[in-house]
Amino acid sequence: EEQLLAWKNRIKQLLEQQNAVLVAHYYTDPLIQSLAEETGGCVSDSLEMARFGAQHKAETLIVAGVKFMGETAKILTPDKRVLMPTLEATCSLDIGCPIDEFSAFCDAHPDRTVVVYANTSAAVKARADWVVTSSIALDVVDHLDSQGEKILWAPDKHLGGYVQRETGADVLLWDGSCIVHEEFKAKGVADLKALYPEALVLVHPESPVAVVELADVVGSTSQLINAAKNSPNKQFIVATDQGIFYKMQQLCPDKEFIVAPTAGAGATCRSCANCPWMAMNALENLCAVLEPGGAEGHEIFVDPELGKRAMKPLQRMLDFRK
Ligand code: 13P
Ligand code: SF4
């Protein structure tokens, strides 16, 4: 307790001294999310993290999330210093889409518009026509489909499949997935639903199709939070990372949120859906990067030429929906 408070106070002091702002994802430790809120930073989904970082006047962005989020911030504002509590925090979607194989896949399908999820490396983004996050994917693909374009989608096959079913677009899928969301089981969600018949089922579209089919609402982290806030329901079954409960509970103190099971069918689990890479962000390493000399080995660098190419599809995303 005392140690946590000491870190919090020290981080606040260092953020101010260094003209730095904290940008955190909804999946990070609640202590980090609350600190971002208290210090004028932002807690949001990956689209709003990108937007916030790009517009904020601070010289340094501290990105608490996973590596692609730090890289996106650096690509959009190459003149800012972008630091992360750890550069080890990656994402199974990023790992599952290496640039050489991806580039060959694109070359083999030159007639397709290349749309990549934000959960990718800078090099993969640089090869794309569009970058999207889960909150904007449907709208962008719908728009491209209405222009008669055929899509090459990477890397998340579950989100891509969802977008394909919803829009009816011609979508060729890369075979990637999120190790956290892929573990949600339809049988487990259905069993929970039987236990809580009044509950609304909220599902992130990185989940398998059988789970998405049981959803009342499918959406990005911020869309799920809004659904919880705006719905008259009092109970929710939530299939996404448990970090999201901090914001849901804060906005809806009188509502009950139940995490969808990831273990065996029928099991109820209150602590399993937790991204191991998001969990690498803690107050301790956040504080350490801000200490004198602490930034070394924690700064995001993107090759400027690559960054310029990656910026185009990213900027297209930000301009698509202001
Ligand atoms: P959101 O864009 O919905 O915040 O999702 C990012 C992510 O990594 C989900 O696993
Ligand atoms: Fe990647 Fe899944 Fe973790 Fe999100 S939750 S960062 S998609 S591994």
Image: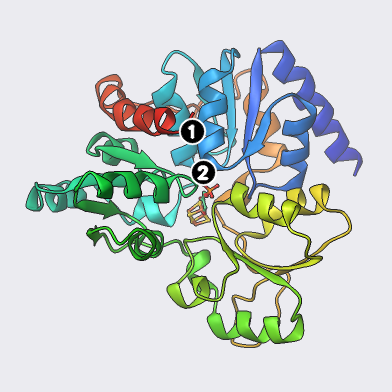
In the depicted view, which residue is nearer to us: 82 or 224? 224
- Indicate left or right for 71 with 152 as reference: right
Residue at screen point 51% across, 46% down: 89
| Residue behind label 2 places its C-beta within 8 angstroms of ligand 2 | yes
* Residue identifier under label 2: 66
- Indicate left or right for 206 with 313 as reference: right
Decide: is 43 above or below 15. Answer: below
Residue 279 coordinates in the image, percent (x, y)? 62, 51
- Indicate left or right for 210 with 251 as reference: left
Decide: is 124 above or below 7. Answer: below
* Residue identifier under label 1: 70
Mark 1–mark 2 CB contact (< 8 Å): yes
Residue 247 coordinates in the image, percent (x, y)? 74, 48
Residue at screen point 50% across, 47% down: 135
Cα–Cα gap, marks 1 and 2: 7 Å
| Residue type at numbered disc 1 | Gly
Decide: is 205 above or below 124. Answer: below
Q: Is residue 267 visible?
A: no
